[in-house]
Image (cartoon, helix red, strand yellow):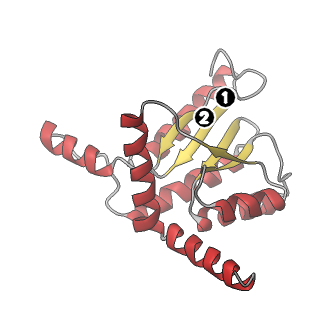
Amino acid sequence: MRRYNKNRPIVYNTFQMYRTDRLAFLKESYSRAKSGAYILGAKIVRGAYMDKERARAAEMGYPSPIQPDKLSTDADYNTAMRFCIDHYENIAFCNASHNATSNQLMSSYIHEKGLAKDHPHFMFCQLYGMSDNLTFNLAKAGFKVSKYMPYGPVRDVIPYLIRRTQENAAVTGDLSREYQMILKEVKRRGL
């Protein structure tokens, strides 16, 4: 970032808010970017490696770096979003979430501050094939939105996609909600 993010964000770091230390790391990263005169690129995610990291901490004998519960993760996620929007001049921020509440909250923060919906430092992002209802409605409202698609060897991509599906089905219920909306639309169209 120090090298490439002088005039516009090119390099981003992912901040996984299910970890207890990531909010502090985001703020520290912001301070470094500000003093280094570059734009911090921050992709905020909840994360999906909780079980692996807890097991590793137990195996290695150190305290778990994972939030105690989902409410704590959500609180840090929301605080991180607010922090990024409050410092938008020096932070380019991607809200990478399928969580409808998080997306509504970010759009509310942007509105509260009277900022442009299409500001180059704000972006929403969802996985290709998931949460299309969020993506399309945010885009229609004038926000910058993108879909991302993982690529790589099948042995690496499939486990990633399975974690995303489990996370969305078990934690937020978004897949079930999206399925219900699709069924409702199919019925409305008489198909």
**Rendered position, 174 above or below 142:** below
Residue in front for this viewpoint, 141 or 23: 141
Q: Residue at x 61, y 43 (%)?
A: 148
* Circle 2/circle 1 CB separation < 8 Å: yes
Q: x, y percentage for residue 65?
A: 30, 46
Mark 2 — residue?
30
**Rendered position, 72 above or below 80:** below
Q: Which quadrant of the figure contains the C terminus?
A: bottom right
Q: x, y percentage for residue 168?
A: 47, 62
Please identify the residue farthest to the top as the structure is shown.
3
Q: Residue at x 21, y 40 (%)?
A: 56
Q: Is residue 21 shown to the viewer in this render?
A: no
Say whether residue 94 is left or right of residue 172.
right
Residue in front for this viewpoint, 124 or 86: 124
The local secondary structure at tag 1 comes to helix
Say whether residue 122 is left or right of residue 175.
right
Mark 1 — residue?
34
| Callout 1 crowding tier (Cα within 10 Å): few <14, some 14–19, many ≥20 | some
Say whether residue 137 is left or right of residue 170.
right
Q: x, y percentage for residue 37?
A: 70, 22
Q: Residue at x 20, y 46 (%)?
A: 55
Q: Could you tell me the amino acid type at mark 1? A: Lys
Q: Is residue 8 shown to the viewer in this render?
A: yes
**Rounded to the nearest whole Å, what is the CA distance between mark 2 and mark 1?**
6 Å
Q: Could you tell me the amino acid type at mark 2? A: Tyr
Say whether residue 87 is left or right of residue 169.
right
Q: Which quadrant of the figure contains the N terminus?
A: top right
Residue in front for this viewpoint, 191 or 1: 191
Quadrant of residue 59 within the rendered picture? top left
Residue in front for this viewpoint, 42 or 134: 134
**Rendered position, 38 above or below 102:** above
